Image (spheres, rainbow, N blue to C red):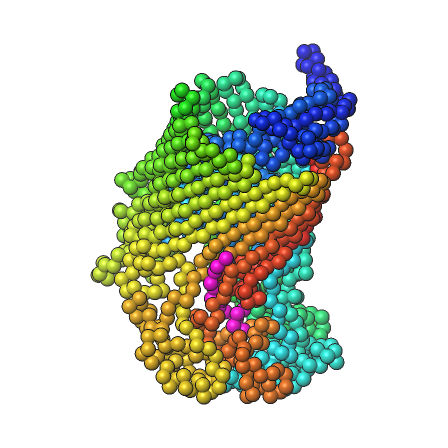
Amino acid sequence: MKRFLTFCTILLSCQSILIAQESITVSGKVTEMESGIPVPSANIIEKGTSNGVMTNFDGEFSIEVPSNAILSISYIGYATKEVPVDGNATLNIQLETEESALEEVVVVGYGTQKKANLTGAVTTVDSEVLQSRPVPNVSQMLQGVVPGLNFQTSGLGGELNSGLNFNIRGSGTIGSGSNSAPLVLVDGMEADLDAINPQIIESITVLKDAAASAVYGSRAAFGVILITTKDGKPGAPRINYNNNFRFTSPLHVPNMMDSHTFALYWNEAANNSGQAPPFSQEVIDRIVQYQNGEIDYGTVPNATGDRFQYYTGSNANTDWFDELYKDFSFSQEHNISLSGGTDKTTYYTSARFMDQNGLLAYGEDTFDDYDFTGKLNTEITDWISFNYSTRFSRKSYNKATQQSGLFYHNIARRWPTVPVRDPNGNFGDASGEIVQLEQGGRTDNLTDRLFMQGQFTITPLEGWNIYAIGNYKLTNNNNHANVLPAYAYDVAGDPFPVSVGYNSPGYSSVYEYHRKEDYYSTNLYTDYSFNINDAHNFKVMAGYNSEVTKYRTIGASRSGLITPDLPTINTATDESRATEGQYQHWAVAGYFGRLNYNFKEKYLLELNARYDGSSRFIDDKRWNLFPSISAGWNIAEEDFWNLDAINLFKLRGSYGELGNQNTSNWYPFYQSMPIGTANGNWLLNGERPNTSGAPGLVSSQLTWERVTSWNLGLDLALLKNKLNLSLEYFNRKTLDMVGPAPELPAILGTAVPRINNADMESTGFEAEINWRDQIGDFNYSIRGTFSDSQQKVLNYPNPTNSISDWYDGRMMGEIWGYTTLGIAQTDQEMQNHLENTSQNQLGSNWEAGDIMYADLNGDGEVNSGDGTLENTGDLSVIGNSTPRYRFGVDLSGDYKNFDFRIFLQGFGKRDYMPNGPYFWGANGGMWQSAGFDEHMDFFRDEDSQMVQAGIAEVNREAYYPRPLFGSGKNQQTQTRYIQDASYLRVKNVQLGYSFKAFQKSRVRFYISGENLLTFTDMIDIFDPESIGLGGWNDGKTYPYSQVFSVGLNVNF
């Protein structure tokens, strides 16, 4: 009965909340607290709605609201204030200047700290910046937002499941097996940056220097990204729903030559190379007829009449990029959250569904993302609270198995003369990419992640807190891939098997792989804050952290499927089955502490230390101490400071040491024995036995990479915080990197292990500036970031001083190449050049249209010497591929119900030397070449076949040399073709409109464009954001995207 009465009471209470409240007119005046002067144009908004007014010149206002409403009052330069109406018809409100906004608290390692008291290199990003762009992952949202946080397209290009590679302040290590990825923590638990739903993020803090990162020890040698997710707020339930519908198009896809131009270009290259023309006049005539609409077939049967002719015998006009990529694809995303609670208990839940469709017109690729988040925070007693959170995500990526590097490699090499379908309407054997995508099998990759966290907070005394946090992460990855037979058709319409990837015709196989990862972490720490005489402020923190990660994998593959309809291991017939599996684990543990002291917030001091241990090192090398110190002076707090316009003037500096244990070899100090299955060279009981080999040497000295850094900073806040400026200058050294093995006599008989023997240095600067103001009803802000860093090798064992390896003093990204004098305009000019400068080591048969290289060392020959620093021949450093002067500019504003955002991003300097057929066109052999519109800008004199045929004009001032097959003599790395890869990109433009749809609700509709315009001097074949990815040379990857989207956001 008691429970029933309680339920009825709650129900009646909820009903009373839902009953519409009596509306009243509230009038009043807004003034500045310190001076009492009126604040004109202040925003008076009914909280949770779009109902609002602005104060007049005298600071007065009048607004009609429910009697129980809460008013939110804001104006640039003042701290936002919330005032309950409580039935009052008159409210006089005083605003504090936003000097008190310097009281803003930011998340730091194991705690929070006032922003004004920070002494390390720390940048914060709030949720408004993150959620204003409709992009699918966090890395794309952060690109260009935080100075020193650098992003670059990964080797997957624009594939649906690809994120961006990122680092803080440049690459930090070249050690063997090492990496300089920052540590990413979501609510204190390790996570992948793109594994979190951007819509649930409250704020992001980036810790850049050793002083800020020190308490995380060896996991944070190259910085930390701290992500804090949203919590529930006390009050009635709040529901937020937003959606986004995207239309995606490929960006920077090359334009192939039409087939007539292509055929003549190919013949020209063959003639220049002393080869027979690939295209006969009969085929060229057919090509012209097809393009003029005189015939409708793209190929004819071969001499035997059983197969169709392709390549040199076909006459279609196909742009394979247009054929293989869609004009646009459609994707959608939906997010909904529910939050609320009481003064004692709050909750927050959210769910997300995202459905992305790729750009491939054949063998469709899709990516689905499901996310769920639940958080509960409760005060058990006045001094004990408990927080629990859980997150689950499922990411499913489905694509054609043959959607790989070879596929992108082959697109450019596909000839436009090849038709998509034969005259019978079937795919021919030259339509290989389409056939392979459509028929050659599918790959499904499913990744589930479960995050759970529980936290107790105990407050025995005022200012003293004890935290006990347990984290668990489970990752399950299941990958299924099959290769199925693919078929083309002959003249009679009968199918025949064709090659699929590297596999022979008719091949089929299946591959299954499962990976399970368990991650456990425990954090126990306490902090205590106190002050002496209201002048000396202290905060002491100490704690313990441990982390354990366990991996288990199992995989199997088998060929010879009985039927393509059931691709499983058991339905494959090959007797040999390839299997794989492993079980690994690693652990770290550490004791950490921090002391913060300030005197009246003028003089600031912070000391950090962590005593860290890693399972990746031998016992006596396992533990190490990593300390840091930072200090600051807030001059604006001094009594002599009388510049009212400057609210903050803080100088700060830091120094710290950290250790890096991020090695690919988890057990480098254990000897291991190579094992072979049934590979013995003798028979045992009629079978070849399993074998094992002698273990190799290991180093007993292998230990931490040490990272030391110092940082100088300046923070300024002016004009009541309307203008904020932050400057950083840093130096970071990575010492004792794992370098090459020392040279020992070959009589040793085994490989020599690597040791810690290499050092490098990074230096750079960062700047961030923010301006925000209000002009009448127009609120606006301008935010800019600018940063630069360079990396230099200080010490690297290189006995021969080879320039193809790291060496002392080498700058990361150096490009060695030849100096170009130009393209020879006549045979005589080339001969005059060769009389004094032999180029025989680069090639032969030099003629008009070929490159003339400079003989820098004056020895009469152009060559690379012996490739050492002592003898580089005619090579010199001609550029550097490291992106420099990274910048981002964010313009945003709102006028009444309208809002907008324009975001620009780019590099100020970068050199790049492209290679491969995408750039050169006629490149190497005829089957490894490409023909794009840009490649027609090649050297042509009166002897050119295309000129003589009246197809093209003489072009002596060409960009490219004469096309050649089978020769790379003109394609050396050289000054003429170094690209200026700097760029400015209009990354995002967005326009929104907000309105009040019904009581206590706010609706925002917006349209957005991503990657709208790009300004660069780089050749138009490439996208400046997707070069230098490795793999199959530039351009041979999934294209970057341009996105137009519409969306709706509803709060009630």
Say whether residue 329 is left or right of residue 707: right
Residue 1010 position (above or below residue 254): above
Say whether residue 256 is left or right of residue 827: right
Residue 607 placement: quadrant: top left
Task: Give the image location of residue 152, x and y in percent.
Answer: 51, 54
Does the magenta portion include 911?
yes
In which quadrant will I find the N terminus? top right
Task: Give the image location of residue 470, x and y in percent.
Answer: 47, 30
Task: Give the image location of residue 540, x and y in percent.
Answer: 39, 27
In which quadrant will I find the C terminus? top right
Q: Look at 63% across and 56% down and name the residue there.
A: 1012
| Residue 47 vs residue 675, the one in the foreground | 47
Residue 686 position (above or below residue 268): above
Count of number-bearing discs: 0
Q: Is residue 930 in view from this perspective?
A: yes
Say whether residue 8 is left or right of residue 146: right
* Identity of the residue furthest to the top in this view: 1
| Residue 753 vs residue 132, the one in the foreground | 132
| Residue 12 vs residue 7, the one in the foreground | 12
Q: Look at 47% across and 64% down and name the residue there.
A: 912
What are the residue bounds of the magenta stretch?
908-921
Task: Give the image location of residue 209, x and y in percent.
Answer: 41, 42
Q: Look at 49% across and 83% down and name the residue there.
A: 825
Q: Is residue 131 in view from this perspective?
A: no
Does the magenta portion include 689?
no
Q: Look at 64% across and 31% down and name the residue there.
A: 39
Residue 787 position (above or below residue 448): below
